[in-house]
Amino acid sequence: MRFDDSLKTVLAADASTAFGAQATFRQLADLIARGRVAADDETLGRLRGLRDQVPVTVRAAVARSFALGQPPVELVALFAQDEPGVASAALRAVRLPSDDWVALIPQLGPSGRATLRRREDLDVEVERALASFGSTDFTLAYTPTPSADTPVHAPVLGLAESMAGLVAEAAASPLQADTETDRQPGSASGFDIAELVDRIASYQQQRAGSPAAPIAPVVDHFRFQTDAGGVIRWTDGAPRGALIGLELARDDAAGTAQVDGVVQGAFRQRTSFTDARLTLDMSESIRGEWRMSAVPLFDPVTGQFIGYNGAARRPRIDQVAARIAEKGNAEGLRRLVHELRTPTNAIAGFSELIETQLLGPVAPTYRERAAAIRLLAADLVAAIEDLDLAARIEAHALELRPDVVELGPLLTRIMADLAPLAALRECTLDLASVEEAPTIVGDERAIERLLSRLIATLVSSGQSGEVIHIAASWNGSANAEVTMTCPRALAELPRDSLLNLDTETESQTPGTPLLGTGFALRLSQSLASQLGGHLAIAPDRMTVTLQAAVAAARRAITS
């Protein structure tokens, strides 16, 4: 017989601070959603009490986590009564029995029922219940202020309450009252029904006569030409305003365009490239990933390089299959990681107790085995943390706290932490002088995670006698750069092969990442993008570009 004290532990936590309130809110909602705690008045009241202390983005992230579970209808109702963004996140993908949906629908507002109407997986009974609220969801809200000597009749108030609420279209374009027919509510009944009917009819006429918003065309390919500096000067097949002036020779500092090392190397060597990666974050019609190919152009008279002529297309399904994942899968992975982390930490802790003989004398053989278990558990914990970070990035739930970080002390601390791994691999870490290292802006824990994971990946591939040089400097756009030389084992591989390395193709030597070098590099790329920078991979080095404090202050002043 086991006693589950999860609720007691959560309720005993300190929720007086902002961080404590968020953690308690997340944990309590998760326990209720998984059925480990009853959705009674006490627990739901605790969630209501914490709701005002939790940001809307956090509440929406908790609501999205219900996608793969079957939370009780009482919990769904609590989130459905929150702000529209939180309510729509909870109602968009949660699964409930038909009877629970029918019981919940009368408690929803017009926006909540509109969210359910866009779903295509509801039963006929639920759709019939939604249809019964059709006329109520498209009425004008009008509640006059009764005077002290005006009697209020119950039937009239009931009619006013039943017709309360206007859809979002009416809120965005309210009706203009006709000044010639503007009338006040009748003093006899407290509500002029004829005036309300006239206003509804006028709104319906205006809505029927308003033109529909044009649908943006879908862009799946475009052609382009650049100048010698890699700036697009001509394009066909895509919005010109979004692409003209875009620089392809290197990653855009504003983060609107990101290219891989293939493009940058081709521009330096004036050679053609095929199916290079391009990621755009601008106009809705061209946002996302592209594959582009281009050939260099040379002046026929002087032979001087004058630019590139090329085309871009959307990637095929086989080129993005590894990245396609529903948000629900990311939420499920985060839940699995949460379940694995606790027992793994317990294994590591108990093995350390045995190794250090804190519980009593232990034979040397068992101490050696405990040490081996502790090292394996530490590798497993690191892999679990990487999976959790990847799932948070995939689900757009990574929380970053902006801060000013001194890059020099941070790199020095990372070098000290990785010294045992470098000694195990018999290679050397050479950190250049950091006295004039830049100061960067970003979440300190995320930046440390990015740099330590990337440097550890390089060290794990190092061979005996190799030296990995690391330097921090400013680049031409006043951003900070951390440059790391690649060991021979990685420098000999093409970029695509490097990003697809896994544990099956790598040798199982000490220090090798548990999830593979390719996963570690892809995770580093994603994390650098989340921090507003990028990771560039060249044949002999890797460069992490991050936002410098000077550049951030300059942009804040100009804006």
Image (cartoon, grey):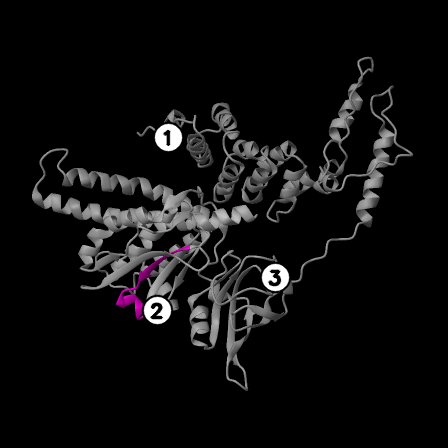
Which element carries disc 3, helix, strand or loop? Answer: helix
Q: Distance between the residues labelled 2 and 3?
A: 32 Å
Quadrant in the picture for the N terminus? top left
Q: State the residue position of label 2.
A: 539
| Residue type marked 2 | Pro
Q: Is residue 485 magenta?
A: yes
Residue 242 shows which numbered tag? 3
Are discs 2 and 1 less than 8 Å apart at CB?
A: no
N-terminal label among 2 and 3: 3
Instruction: Judge whether 304 appears above or below 525 on screen.
Output: below
Residue 385 image position (x, y, % from top left): 34, 47
- The tag earlier along the polypeptide, 3 or 1, is 1
In the image, the segment drawn in magenta is 480-492
Type of the residue with mark 3: Ala
> On residue 46, which mark appears?
none
Q: What residue sits right under mark 1 in the picture?
A: 6
Name the mark nearer the viewer: 2 or 1.
2
79, 484: nearer the viewer: 484
Q: In this view, does 462 lie above or below 184?
A: below
